[in-house]
Amino acid sequence: DAGVIQSPRHEVTEMGQEVTLRCKPISGHNSLFWYRQTMMRGLELLIYFNNNVPIDDSGMPEDRFSAKMPNASFSTLKIQPSEPRDSAVYFCASSFRRGMNEQFFGPGTRLTVL
Amino acid sequence: ILNVEQSPQSLHVQEGDSTNFTCSFPSSNFYALHWYRWETAKSPEALFVMTLNGDEKKKGRISATLNTKEGYSYLYIKGSQPEDSATYLCAFSGATNKLIFGTGTLLAVQP
């Protein structure tokens, strides 16, 4: 298995532009998580899905952020419009839907908003 | 608000030293405690998942213990090597499969 796949790996955009981050979880995993890593707040959970259904989006910072999971093998995190303070590394992770199961992280997308 | 705390924040040791870190977490509604290793410019990788009070896990020179009644876990590294340099994260899981991460302990092992 190729592991969790994220694209793009790096994204540089200008303030106000729409940004879409993509994630392909490990085949067979039925939970998917989006995290954001910043110097100030460390690794914070934005949203997670079980069986393609959003379960907890309390970590989504504001309405400019949205996430979808149209099927078991694909998820997107969209920021519209983007702002410089959104600059961070965004990680996607997947696991089996049980708390004791480890999460497997993708390589992350480094987003820079100018 | 669930809080997971790790100490120390950072640690500098010499090659060959043994070291340990602490993770404290809520003792109520406990389901699992995870340890992850996170190297610079890479993504976190799972080391251990522990669920039972008194549980001990070992992988090579790294081991971990769990006390769910008092809400803490220790991670030990025996004979640290430069390649052990990384941030070590612990994460608490309650009734859901959502993980609450601590801020990590940054370990630097000098040759």
Image (cartoon, grey):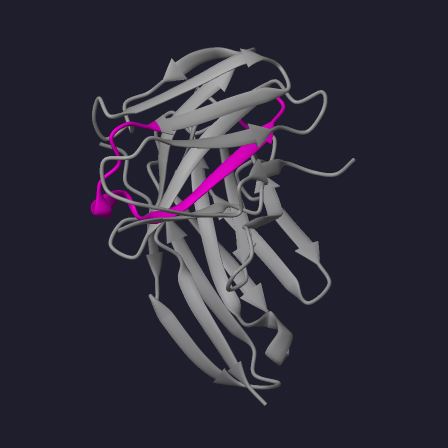
For the point 34% across and 62% down, the residue is B7
Q: Depth check: B11 or A65 in front? A: A65
Q: Find the magenta span and give its range.
A: A79-100
Q: Position of residue A103 (x, y in %)?
A: 57, 36
Q: Is residue B6 magenta?
A: no
Residue A100: quadrant of the picture = top right
Q: Is residue A87 magenta?
A: yes
For the point 48% across and 29% down, the residue is A33
Q: Does residue B83 appear anywhere in the picture?
A: yes
- The answer to whether A56 is drawn above or below residue A105 in the figure is above
Q: Does residue B78 appear anywhere in the picture?
A: no
Q: Is residue A83 left or right of residue B108?
A: left
Residue A6: quadrant of the picture = top right
Q: Depth check: A97 or B30 in front? A: A97
Q: Position of residue B107 (x, y in %)?
A: 47, 71
Q: Quadrant of the C terminus of chain B?
A: bottom right
- The answer to whether B18 is drawn above or below residue B51 in the figure is below
Q: Quadrant of the N terminus of chain B?
A: top left
Q: Position of residue B35 (x, y in %)?
A: 53, 49
